[in-house]
Amino acid sequence: MKTGCHSAMDRWRWLVAGLAIAFGVATLLEGGHVLFGGPQARAEAGNVVPFVLWFNFAAGFAYLGAGSGTLIERRWAVWLAWGIAAFTGLVFAAFGVHVLLGGAFETRTFVAMTFRTAFWLAQSIVLPRLCRQEAS
C-alpha cells in the first residue's frame, strides 16, 4: 500500500484528472447543444463566435484525453495539456482580434476563454509533478 508522498500525489492526480474530464464532458455537452441543438439552441446562445465554438467543442475531446492520460500516468498527457493551453491561447488571441474588429460576441465567451486558458496553463504546470510514469 502506498503511503506518504505518493498517496498524496495520487489524490492530487485523481483530482486534476477528474477536473479535466468533467470540464471535457461539460464542454462537449454545452458546445454540442449549441452546435447540434437546432435554431432555437443557437438563438438562445446569442452572439456565438463560430470558430471559438467549434474549437472549444473539438477541444472537449482533447480534455477527455488529457484527463484519461493523467489518470493512467502517461507522460503524453503533459504534452497534450501544453498543446491544449497553447492552442486555446491562440484561439483566444484570434477572438480578441475578432472583438477589436467589431465582431459580435458574448461577454461570457471572454470569461470562458480566460478560464479555459488559465485552467490549461495550470494543468500543464501541475501535471509534470503528478505523472511519474515514463510509459507512453
Image: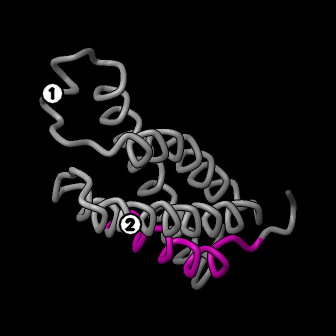
Q: Residues within 10 Å of mark 1 (few under 14, many from 20)?
A: few
Q: Where does the magenta region start and end?
A: 115-132
Q: Residue furthest front?
A: 101
Residue sitting at 34 percent across and 32 percent down? 29
Query: Horizontal and vertical percent for residue 88?
Result: 50, 62
> x%, y% of residue 58?
53, 40
Query: Disc 1 designates what residue?
Result: 43
User: Between 113 and 25, which is closer to the camera in this rendering?
Assistant: 113
Residue 70 % position (x, y): 63, 59
Q: What residue is at 32 percent from the left and 67 percent from the top?
A: 115
Tell me the amino acid under the disc marked 1: Ala
Q: Residue at x 52, y 66 (%)?
A: 90
Whether residue 32 is situated above or below residue 75 in the rendered picture: above
The image's mark for residue 111 is none
Task: Tell whether 40 sits left or right of 17.
Answer: left
The residue at the point 21 percent across, 52 percent down is: 105
Nearest the viewer among 27 and 51 is: 51
Badge nearest the viewer, 2 or 1? 2
Queried whether the magenta region covers residue 118, the answer comes back as: yes
Q: Which residue is the site of mark 2?
A: 97
Quadrant in which the C terminus is drawn: bottom right
The furthest residue to the top: 38
Query: In the rendered view, does 71 fall on the left or right side of 90?
Result: right
Between the residue at mark 2 and the residue at mark 1, the CA separation in whole angstroms equals 24 Å
**Amino acid at circle 2:** Val
